[in-house]
Structure formats: C-alpha cells, structure tokens
Image (spheres, rainbow, N blue to C red):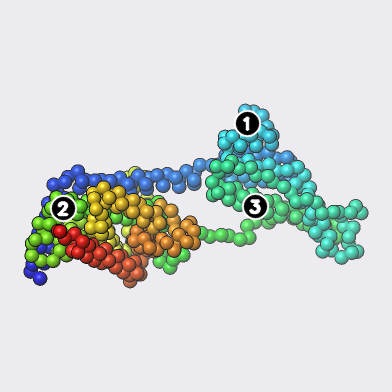
Amino acid sequence: MWLFLIKYTASTYKETLLLLRDRAGLAMLFIMPAALVMIMTLLQDSTFKVLEEKKLSVLVVNQDADTFGINIVDGLKQSKFFHVIDSLKGKALTESTLREQVATGNFQIGIVVRPNATGNIRENMKYNMLQQLPDEHSDVFGSDSIALSPPASIEVFFDPVTKNSFKQAIISALREYSSLVEAKVMFGVYSGVFEDMLGIKLKQQGMSTRMVNINEQYASTDEHLAVPNSVQHNVPAWAVFAMFFVVIPLAGNLIKERESGVSLRLRTMPGSDLAMIMGKVTTYFMVIILQALLMLVIGIYLLPLLGLPQLNPGHHYLALFVLTATIALAATGYGILVGTMAGTLEQSSIFGSISVVILAAIGGVWVPVFMMSDVMQVVTKLSPLNWSLNGYYDIFLRNASLIDILPNLTALFLFFVTCVSIGWWVNTHKNQPS
C-alpha cells in the first residue's frame, strides 16, 4: 500500500510539473473551451433572435379580391412573422413575376389566392346546408339549383432551398387564417337563412371573440424552474465537449512517455503500474474541474455582460459537483484508454479528436436528440457525452437532485472504470519490453 501511495504521489507530482511548464498547452485547455462556449452561445442566441424578430418576406398575389382573399392577405400583414409584398418596383405583382422571383431565389415564398375563392366557399356552404334542411325548405336560396363547386384554392410556391420550418410556419398560418375566413363566410350564409326563414337578423358581434386560449408553460411542479434559453442549453453542452477534449493532451503525454523511454524507467520502480495511471487521472481530473468552474463563471457573470441571459445552475449544488467530478473521471479515463491503445502520437491525436467529435454528434451536443431518427435515438444512449449532457440538463432545467441523476452518474463511473481497467491491462501486458 505504501509503495502504491509513493508511486501515485510521484506520478501526480510529475504530471503537475509537466502541465505547469507547458504554459501554451495549459492555456489552450482553458482559453479554447471558454472561447468555444462564448462563441457558440452568442451564435445560437443571435440565431434565435433573428427567428423571433426578423419578418419573413412573402410575395402575395390576390386574384380573388373578395372576402376570402382580402382577409388572407390582411391576416398575413397583421402577423408579426411575415412581411407581405404585393408589388415590386411600383408595379403590382403577377403570378408569372412571383414564380420567377421565387424560382431565382430572390424570395423564398410566394402565395397566389385563386379567383372566385370566396364565391366557391359560399356556394359549397349553401350546398352543404341544403343537404341538411328538410325538402320543404329546399328553396331557401331561391329556385336556382346549387351544385358543389371546387374548393377555394391557394397556391404556395417555395424556393427549393427553403427550410421545412419556414414551410410549416407559412402553411400553418394560412390554415389558421383560412379557418377564420371560412367561419366569417359561414356566418354570412347562416345569417341570411335565419333572416329569410325566421325573420331574425343575427348580429355579427362576437364572431371575432376567441373561444379557446392556448397557454404555453413548462411541465414542472417546481416554481423555481429555470427558463430554457440559449445559455442554459449551450453552456453545459459545449462545456462537456471541451471536458472530453482533454483526451488529446492526456493521450499524447502517454505516447511521449512510451516513445522516450520514460514509461519503461517508471515501470522499474516498485509498485503497481496502476499508481502511475491514477496519478495522471488525478492531475487531469483537477484540470477538468477547473475547466468546469471557468464555464460556470462565464455563464453566470460574463455572458450577461454580452447581452445574453444569465446561467441558472439550479439549487442542487452537491448534485452539480458530483456530476462534474464524475464527468471529469470519465473524460480522463477515456484519455487513458486512447493513450494506451494508440501506437503513435499522430494516431492518438487524430483518433482522440475525431472520436470526441463523433461522440458529441451522436450525444446531442450539436443536434437535439428528439430530432434524430429512431435508430440514432437508440445509438445516442451509448455516448458518455449524452449521459453528461442529460445530467446537466436535469440539474439546470429540471432542478434535479443527486438521486434523480444517479443513472447518469452510474453510467459515467462505470465508463471510467472500464476505460482505466482496459488501459491498465494493455499497459501491463502489451507494452512490456521485449
């Protein structure tokens, strides 16, 4: 036991000295993650603001010139999401001009309301009403027969590069305005029938009264729940990404020791090789803890100075510390594994960086998990970055306690034990001098 402690202490001291002497490398371990968190948060926050504040320009040609077409155009104009354009260079838009402008990419969306849309809606409503009235009242609309007309038509033209989110926003808005206009036309038809049959003239008051309110809120019983924003999502995501990038200096250090012969000389010291490995783990563990602390300081104090929301770390500080410590163990364990398995410095740096990027991609750092395919949603559960990210989200956004994140902690700790065990076995059995 004493031999293990002596070797462990010596290894930790050596690794600490090497890190402190490599000032450029040490600066990279802290400056790069800090820059990554700030840049990505600023970029995504500005993107969200653009989507919220910038109106989408929409070309509109109204060929109906009646209730339906007029109300559709007015609805789009009154919306805070769309900027309606019905003329270019002082000339009224035509359908051919609209299609040309959208096809060439000058505008993303064009809308054409077809002629006689309102008349078709009225005729179809009268036809449907006649099907419900008794035969003795079949002349309520006069002696002329009423036939089913084609549905009112709206053509929506999209630029091929238009994102689906914009398409869905336009289609949803048009359906909403169309339903409101249909209700107005229906009221006019029914009002005429009431007046003819009963002598009662309906008032139009109340037709615009909203009967259903849709209230947006987050599903939580915790009144102190943090409001999700770009900071709450991006700081933990890119902090986890930066933590796992410690694999590059850690694995590189192992390779350099092996190539220079230092590893062989250290192995001649009495005691287990595990002590040397744990010495490296301890040194880089402290580096990652300091990294995480820096990320929290940036999120809480620096980002608000840049006009971004303040990071709310939640109320369970013990859970936050334990999760961060476990992530640090998992990241250092992965670095040990890569360093012992790689044959050269180039292999460790290339594989280490690419593997972390892949684990981040499938772990939900770049693309939210719910947007992935069913197969990828299963694969993402294999990424330690996903376990880490979900743990932070639970604490920051769901106010989770230590017990709540226990599955994430268990998975990360088992990952650390597995990586170190494999690294120790490889270091002991495969890297012996011939």
Q: Is residue 417 above or below residue 143?
A: below
Q: Earlier in the sequence, mark 2 or mark 1?
A: 1
Instruction: Return the x and y of residue 309 as percentages of the image width and height.
Output: 37, 50
Measure the C-alpha gap from mark 1 to mark 3: 26 Å
Q: Which residue is mark 2?
A: 257
Quarter occupied by the N terminus:
bottom left
Q: Earlier in the sequence, mark 3 or mark 2?
A: 3
Q: Is residue 89 above or below residue 72?
A: above
> Which label was assigned to residue 163?
none
Q: Which residue is mark 3?
A: 175
Instruction: Return the x and y of residue 164 as percentages of the image width and height.
Output: 55, 49
Report whether 95 appears left or right of 199: left
Alpha-carbon neighbours of circle 2 within 10 Å: few (<14), some, or many (≥20)?
Answer: some
The residue lying at 74 percent from left, 49 percent from top is 152
The residue lying at 78 percent from left, 50 percent from top is 150
Give the SS element for disc 3: helix
Measure the C-alpha gap from mark 3 to mark 2: 67 Å
Measure the C-alpha gap from mark 2 to mark 1: 70 Å
Give the SS element for disc 2: helix
- The kind of residue tagged 3 is Arg
Quarter occupied by the C terminus:
bottom left
Report whether 308 appears left or right of 264: right
Indicate which label's residue lies in the foreground, 3 or 2. 2
Give the SS element for disc 1: strand
Indicate which label's residue lies in the foreground, 2 or 1. 2
